[in-house]
Amino acid sequence: MKRYQFNEITTMQYIFLISGTQVGIGILSLPAQLADIANTDGWIAIVIGWVISIIASTIIIKTMEKHPQDTIFDLSRRYFGRILGTIIHLAFVGYALLASVTVVFTSIHITQVWILPNTSNYLVMVLFMLPGFLITRNGVRVLGRYAEVVFYLTLWMPILIAIPLQKGTVLHMLPVLKDGWTPIFQAVKTTVLSFLGFELAFVFYPFLKEKQHAVKAMVIANSISGFTFLLITVTCFIFFSPDEISSLIWPTLSLLKTIEFSFIERFEVIFLSFYLFVMSTTGIPYIFTTVFGISQLLGKKDHTIVLFIAVCIFICTSFLYNPSFVDIQTMGSWWERYGLWGAYIFPIILFIYVSVAQWFQGGKKK
Amino acid sequence: MKRWTYMFLCLFFIVGCNAKTQLDELTLALTVGLDESQNGKLLVYSISPVFNKESENIYEVIRTSGVTTRDGRSKANAFASGKIVGGKVQNVIVSKTFAETHDMFSYLDVFYRDPKNSITANFIVFDGPLKKLMYIHLKDKPRLSVAIRDVILTAHTSKQTTKANMLLFHRLALDRAQTPFAPMLKVHKGDLVAGGIALFNEQRKYVGSLSQTESPYFSILQKNIKPSTFLTLAIKGLTKQKEYISISVEHGDFSYKPSFRNGTFHFDAHMRLGVVMTESTTYIDMKKEKKKLEKLLAKEIQKQLELVVKKLQTYEVDPIGFGLYARAYEYKQFQKQKSWAKAFAKAEINIHPTVEIISYGVLQ
């Protein structure tokens, strides 16, 4: 029996949902973080990170294939019993909550720094939460459609990157392998974390209509994200000098700041306003996962009420608390530490555990 | 219920109207100048257009003194006719004497740190006290900020000076392999004159300049030829008398090959220049003597380029970016250098230009 028949998404929507979750706030600071560790060899780390994330997401799909109608929330209950299962359930909800809080507050902070310095953060929060609420309320299908529309809407953005690319110097990239492989492997950790987002396959896989394409879809989604990261990073490395780039916090935005037309200045404002769409495709799936997880825990079918309460809490929080940049960085590092476990180590353990358990049960399918 | 939602939304969107600003209530600083007063205080000048029809001047100049650039601007708000906005800055001008004694980078920090500020503004060094520039009377020119920008851009196109925006200055100042440079501007007989290139050392202090006649050679070394670079060369030895030949360099192929031998860097700079002859003060039989003339031109260009490079080496600056090549191809040795500028000063640079005359006009 299909549990989510009225909420199925196509393979395309699934691809854009996953890659939309991956490409988000991280890309704005990724080039600087990479340059900090591995100098201009950072792009090699992206390629390695891309391979690792494909492996990890394939493992997730292979685990989920064993019970195609189950999300991680059902799966944890099924294999770990009531108490342990609930703990894993809560941990995953906690992870999604942390991710959504980080994404939302980082987006607000960036908006305030670059576009709306005089606007209070709760106003921006309300503006973010209104569309967020409307999209999340309608479930995975609308989420998928939204991700697809946003992808098409933002196709013009990479073309813009070509403008600063012309003014750069390829000499900055040379020599390849400046200080050997050690710093590159150190930088892999950073890139692996920018690929975070595929772990939501744990939640979205049951909604996928054509499940035979799932692995292919994950590879494509990861490749779209990987290509985007590579494009931005290489452009930043070519445009900024190697010593300069680590002095910037958001090199991607600084890069766009240099684009100037005779009829428009501060082009990054327009870009960033559009980029809010991209950021929303990162934040909304995490908010959905949080809300969906909580309502499953409470045994509710409809997640609208939980979502409403969550949105209210978000807005109230922003009234009382305006995180500084240091707080946001701390939040980000928590998310990354948690994400390393949640998206890379946990799936492997789960896969082994599920396989062994099934083997003991003699291949009997429930 | 729905109506109330819409009304609430409408109210919500007018929140921003509270902080509205009207253009004629703003003082748009188009040019910012930094100088030092006689008692060592920082002087911050700003030029902004005046939109008021009743006022006589079309721009106003505000001078304040402060501890930092931003501090100066805050004080300027006290007597500017509107709220000062820095996002439209087109030129950032520092006086030569100020740049000689202060690390420029720390004074420009506000332009980079505050995202509201424009970083594509031109960075210019002014030869003389800024007072002279700020209170100049230009009857036949547009507003001063526009005039400054136009003068610099025109001079840059004809290679009489160079162009450097704040972004480039930032890159050159932070990169270990290069040093910053900037166009020079001066006031001569009540007129704005752009010419020459100011050179900054690794401490981002002004150390010296290239003259206007050296500027085209500087842009050739930078591989910045287009649109054509004009050179007038004095050539002896073709005929018995002293002759001048003017050429315009149309295109060029460059290869800078670094190597590291016996503790110094060597650069083999090969360049093939395609030139068009535009003027010759004596008669030359081009059919017979084209090859010979090409060689003589190449030799003269080589001499001039070597002089420019020598000058850069004596100042211990590398605005051309030989360091980029050293880093890209001799990374290990480059990393060992404590200061690239010092290593560059000791480097041996061989320039081998070859000249090809594409055309010599409509005269035989």
Image (cartoon, grey):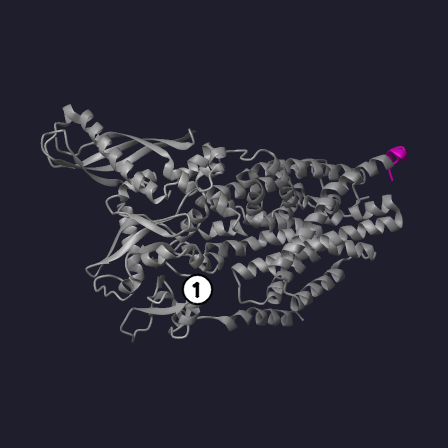
| Residue B206 vs residue A143, the one in the foreground | B206
Q: Is residue B6 magenta?
A: no
Q: Is residue A361 magenta?
A: yes
* Quadrant in the picture for residue B326: top left
Q: Is residue B282 above or below residue B117?
A: above
Q: Mark 1 sits on what residue?
A: B68
Which residue is outermost to the front? B262
- Taking the image as shown, residue A355 lies to the left or right of residue B64, namely right
Say which amino acid is labelled 1: Thr
> Could you say whether the residue bearing mark 1 is in a helix, strand or loop?
loop
- Taking the image as shown, residue B309 lies to the left or right of residue A216, namely left
Q: Range of the magenta residues?
A: A358-366
Does residue A142 show up?
no
> Residue B226's x, y, as percent?
30, 40
Q: Is residue A242 above or below residue B285?
A: below
| Residue A102 vs residue B298, the one in the foreground | B298
- The C terminus of chain A sits in image quarter: top right
Is disc 1 surrounded by few (<14), some (14 to 19) or many (20+) residues within 10 Å?
A: some
Q: Residue at x 36, y 41 (%)?
A: B320
Which residue is outermost to the right? A361
Q: Chain letter of disc 1?
A: B
| Residue A229 vs residue A296, the one in the foreground | A229
| Residue A233 vs residue B46, the one in the foreground | B46
Does residue B298 show up?
yes
> Residue B29's x, y, as percent?
38, 65
> Residue A226's x, y, as percent?
60, 40
Q: Is residue A363 above or below residue A140?
A: above
* Quadrant in the picture for residue B289: top left
Which residue is outermost to the top? B288
